[in-house]
Amino acid sequence: MSSDSLSEPLSEPLAAAPADPADSPFLTERTVRDEAQQFVLPLVAHIEKTDPPARTDALVTAARAVLTMLSDERSLGEGRWAQLMRDWQDARIRKVVRRARGAEWRKASALPGITVTGERAEVRVFPPVPLDGWPKELAKLQVSGTDLDDPEPPAAPDPAGPVLWLNPEVGMSAGKTMAQVGHGVQLAWWELSETERKAWREAGFPLSVATPDPARWRALTVSGLPVVRDAGFTEIAPGSCTVVADHPALRH
């Protein structure tokens, strides 16, 4: 699953979902979260020009990378990344996906973080950094260049497992979508019990990413499952619903 993950059981939840929905980290209205110092969770996708990964593979791998960071012992309790993780989650839950190839990827891989692999995709997730304090090795990486395709139709999602459903009416680059599915799994993670989190982690964070038809999408958004409403910093309008996080333990 990853080149730098740990196998110890979870010691405690990293964060709970906001008790007051009005303080959601994804709302577009200004809240107390905007008064805190703003941090970003960096994700870097390994995308070689001549051999890019499939889009869905990259999306699944990015989502699993976020879950791996959330559950890593270094992110919990008194771990070396724990304070950064708390500071990040006290503010807006921002994620930025950049791409790297060749020497850029090797330099990024030398920084503290976790590389998660998919079928062919590789995504490295790093501890949160201040919005204006990126390491130089990451700051120079491109946000553009993440427009990936699926050479073949993706496999149908496993209905018995977690599924991240994408809005069929909102177009986003692969990089933007990788950040959105990361938001989705984080919302689902917050709502799971400690036992459910541990089971998902020990299974290797299996999940699917799929796009439903418009009618099913509308039903999903009112089903009670976690819904990502984007803050609108890039690409799409503020308040756009982008992802519904469907986990078996959260189904009503």
Image: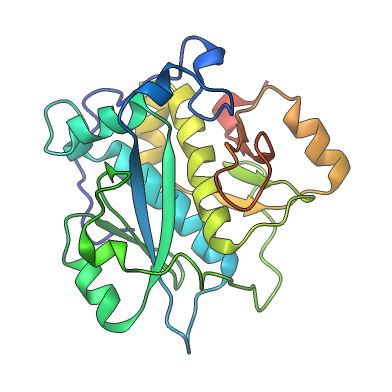
For residue 9, above or below residue 107 = above
Q: Quadrant of the N terminus?
A: bottom left
Residue 70 image-quadrant placement: top left
Q: Is residue 215 left or right of residue 235?
A: right
Is residue 202 something that shows in the picture? Answer: no
For residue 209, above or below residue 159 = below
| Residue ID at (33%, 46%) | 68
Percent across and percent down for residue 66 are 39, 46
Percent across and percent down for residue 137 are 23, 66
Outermost top residue: 20
Outermost right residue: 215
Is residue 246 something that shows in the picture? Answer: yes
How are the residues colored? rainbow
| Residue ID at (30%, 30%) | 37
| Residue ID at (24%, 49%) | 133
Percent across and percent down for residue 21 are 55, 14
Q: Is residue 102 left or right of residue 142?
A: left
Image mark count: 0
For residue 155, above or below residue 248 = below
Q: Quadrant of the C terminus?
A: top right
Outermost bottom residue: 50
| Residue ID at (42%, 46%) | 95
Q: Is residue 16 left or right of residue 185?
A: left
Taking depth in this image into account, of 104 and 225 the one nearest to the observer is 104
Percent across and percent down for residue 65 are 38, 51
Q: Is residue 148 left or right of residue 154?
A: left
Residue 54 image-quadrant placement: bottom right
Taking depth in this image into account, of 25 and 219 the one nearest to the observer is 25
Taking depth in this image into account, of 120 and 38 the one nearest to the observer is 38
